[in-house]
Amino acid sequence: MQLEFETEWGTTIQCGDLIIQKAHPFVPASCDPKCQNGGVCSNGLCRCSKMFVGDQCEVRVQPNGSLNLIMFVLVILITAIGIMFFLKNEKQKRDMEKAFQQSQWNYNN
């Protein structure tokens, strides 16, 4: 690109390169308004924690209750299975002790 100016000292010619680039949206250096609920500003955008969403992390995400129910049922189920194995072992142990005592009694008599 070349520009020409007339001045009191004569014609001035200014040359320069013109570069055409794709426009980039303006991103502010800081978040305005400020990030909320522990969000962190990064390149003008709020990065929210897992429990919040929105431009300023202003909306709390509601946890999914079905996952909590599944976990509760699994814990109860595992506990019940553990108790059943414990009781079965205790019964086997008592039966073996009883059989041993009977065999000792039969041997002594």
Image: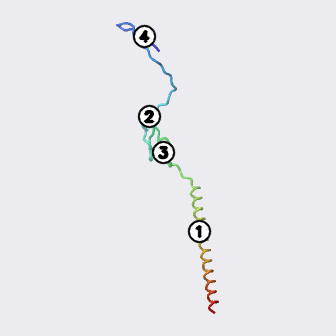
102 or 22: nearer the eye?
102
Q: Earlier in the sequence, mark 1 or mark 2?
A: 2
Horizontal and vertical percent for residue 84? 61, 71
Residue at 37% from the left image edge and 9% from the top image edge: 7
Task: Give residue 16's quadrant in the image.
Answer: top left
Q: Which mark is residue 28?
A: 2
Horizontal and vertical percent for residue 10? 37, 6
Query: Quick one: quadrant of the C terminus?
Result: bottom right
Question: Crowding near pointer 4: few (<14 within 10 Å), some, many (20+)?
Answer: few
Furthest toward the bottom, the residue is 109
Figure check: 45 above or below 19: below
33 or 4: nearer the eye?
4
Q: Earlier in the sequence, mark 2 or mark 3?
A: 2
Do callouts 2 and 3 mark residues in contact (Cβ within 8 Å)?
Answer: no
Structural distance between the alpha carbons of marks 2 and 4: 37 Å
Amino acid under label 3? Cys
Q: Earlier in the sequence, mark 2 or mark 4?
A: 4
Label 3: which residue? 48
Q: Which mark is residue 82?
A: 1
Residue depth check, mark 3 versus mark 1: number of the one nearer the observer: 1
Helix, strand or loop under label 1: helix
Label 4: which residue? 4
Do callouts 4 and 3 mark residues in contact (Cβ within 8 Å)?
Answer: no
Question: Crowding near pointer 1: few (<14 within 10 Å), some, many (20+)?
Answer: few
Structural distance between the alpha carbons of marks 2 and 3: 17 Å
